[in-house]
Amino acid sequence: MNSAQRPAAPAISVENLAKHYAGAPVFSAVSFDVAAGEIVAIVGESGVGKSTLLNCLAGLDHWDAGRITHDGADLGALSDDQRAVWRRAHLGFVFQAFHVLPHLDVAQNVGLPLMLLGRHQEAAARVAAMLDAVGLGGLGARLPQQLSGGQLQRVAIARALVHRPRLLLADEPTGNLDPATATRILDLLTSQARAAGAALVLATHSRDAAQRADRVLQLRADGMAAA
């Protein structure tokens, strides 16, 4: 990414972040910034804490030291309820385990962020557009139990993008997809992030996914470094 594409202030900033479980360190001294419209891939060995780091960036996990700010807002200073409101308005998250709601059909799952934001009028058209974009056009009335794992992954991605969030987090977003579909989904994630000026942080083991990023960072127990 050239300097003309980068704003002066980062969209999300992480300073000296540390996380422990039951007294055992997961990672420490993690610091990095991501600009609006920038794509950053996080790589690292299994168990190093990539998913945990994304959960911290989303305000879903509490961290033990350090600071996370998004567009100047200090996530650590927000209550749990305030973080939930912030996530609803500004965050799209593609979870490794999908978290698709089984009692809602595909269209309802994808449109949930818009419903929670009260954006009912645009929901039908936007949901249809997103389902077409991820190759699930015409499947909106199906229940999650009627879809394959790869299709569920695409539902999760459409849901994360539908409300045009400012911050996108993706945990192994192509892990359950065939190569052709994985390429299409990576194209969608990156193009949507750039079009919306959103910061995209993805944790991945995929070399192809990492190569789409503007920067690749390696998470280690003692911090973060350029890969």
Image (cartoon, helix red, strand yellow):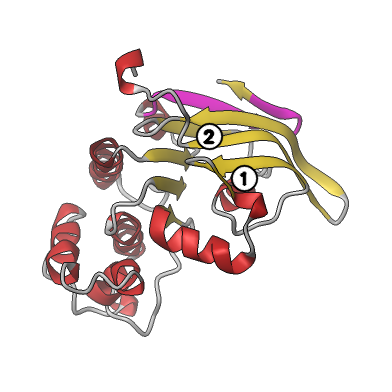
Q: Quadrant of the C terminus?
A: top right
Q: What secondary structure is the stretch in magenta mostly built from?
A: strand
- Inspect the image, locate mark 1, and give the three-letter code of the amino acid beneath it: Leu
Residue 97 visible in rendering: no
Q: Quadrant of the N terminus?
A: top left
Quarter of the figure with residue 37? top left
Image coordinates for residue 38, horizontal then vertical, percent: 38, 30
Quarter of the figure with residue 209? top left
Q: Secondary structure at mark 2?
A: strand
* Residue of label 2: 42
Callout 1–callout 2 Cβ contact below 8 Å:
yes
Image coordinates for residue 44, horizontal then vertical, percent: 60, 33
Q: Which residues are magenta?
A: 213-224
* Residue of label 1: 53
Q: Secondary structure at mark 1?
A: helix
Image coordinates for residue 132, horizontal then vertical, percent: 13, 58
x 52%, y 40%: residue: 72
